[in-house]
Amino acid sequence: MNLRPFVREPSVLPENRKRVHVSMIFAISHGPMLSSVDTADPAAVEAEVQAVYQRLFRDKGVEFVRRAFRWALSCFSGNHAGYLPIDAGYHDLEHTMQGTLCLARLFEGRDRSGVLPRIDQSVFDLSLIAILFHDMGYLKTSDDVQGTGAKYTLIHVDRSVEFVGRFLRKEGFEPGQILSVQQMIRCTGVNVNIEEIPFQNDLIRLAGFALGTADLVGQMAASDYPDKLPILFEEFVEAAEFNGGWTANFGPFESAIHLMSQTNDFYSKYVKPKLDGKLGGLHRFLADSYPDGRNEYMESIDRNLHRVKEIVAAG
């Protein structure tokens, strides 16, 4: 592996510290954010991530991006020894592609804003692995033929952390690098207490917050998010049955419409406060110009929530 091990670095500067001439950087437009890449096409997402990578690290090749995508696609498709393809209906490959694309764009938006410190190549590389592997906890072993991976919903983050640890050790990653990836993945847990994650340094903390942001925003901004909520309900039902019933922190949901009726509250009482608060407001870097330019991701979430309301009202 050509990634250097991580060492503790000085504390980062506050997010409101900007480089000189930052107003010139603000004027740079990201261009189309949502409509330009088909997240159902992993090759298209990979091409966009490669383009972002080359813009951020101009003197570096994109071989690591290619390798990371090959690893992830191999696992999703059932070509990783001892495992079946991921068969969860909602937490599928496209879900991961949505988060991956969002993460790359967030990093590029932050870089263009001039906020210091920059996300360096090594942190970007580890973050890319983390987002591509953050839902590997839905994988089933070859002898696990009952149900789908959705039954592991309540423990999928722990399973993802364990899986990526084994995978990266075999690929020659250093212990510090593996731990950094695992810490980032933990930021995607719904009930995780982020303050209790012992991040190795402040850049890894920032990357973890970006990962948690991209996971939430990427899926909720997808054009088919309202249509996929019944599939998410089915995953939740399977998980509840696997765990002997609904738990205090999970459900209960009586039907897909019942779940959808709770979606706007889920966003306003959990997602938005988390994005603005514990995750550091990093979704603002998805704006066309930071921090107050048009943010197509957040606009799409608003449209989706309105559409969910209409579906619920129609019964």
Image (cartoon, rainbow, N blue to C red):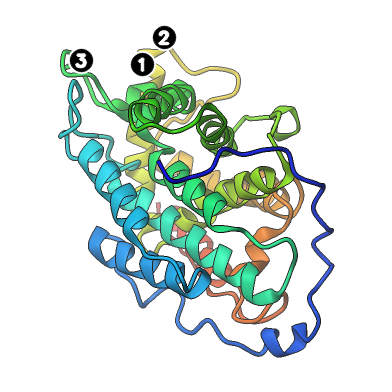
Amino acid type, label 1: Glu
Viewer-proximal residue, 277 or 57? 57
- Could you tell me which residue is drawn at 70 percent across and 34 percent down? 194
**Is residue 127 left or right of 6 when viewed as pictured?**
left
Secondary structure under tag 3 reads loop
Res. 144 mark:
3
Amino acid type, label 3: Asp
Residue behind mark 2: 244
- Could you tell me which residue is drawn at 73 percent across and 27 percent down? 196
The answer to whether residue 115 is above or below residue 192 is below
> Could you tell me if residue 309 is visible in this image?
no
Q: CA distance from mark 3 to mark 2?
A: 18 Å
Instruction: Find residue 118 and report its horizontal and vertical position in percent.
Output: 67, 63
**Is residue 172 left or right of 217 when viewed as pictured?**
left
Pointer 2 and pointer 1: residues touching (CB < 8 Å)?
yes
Secondary structure under tag 1 reads helix
- Circle 2 packing at 10 Å, graded few (<14), some (14-19), many (20+), is few
Give the residue at the far top of this rendering: 244
Q: CA distance from mark 2 to mark 1?
A: 5 Å
Residue behind mark 1: 241
Pointer 3 and pointer 2: residues touching (CB < 8 Å)?
no
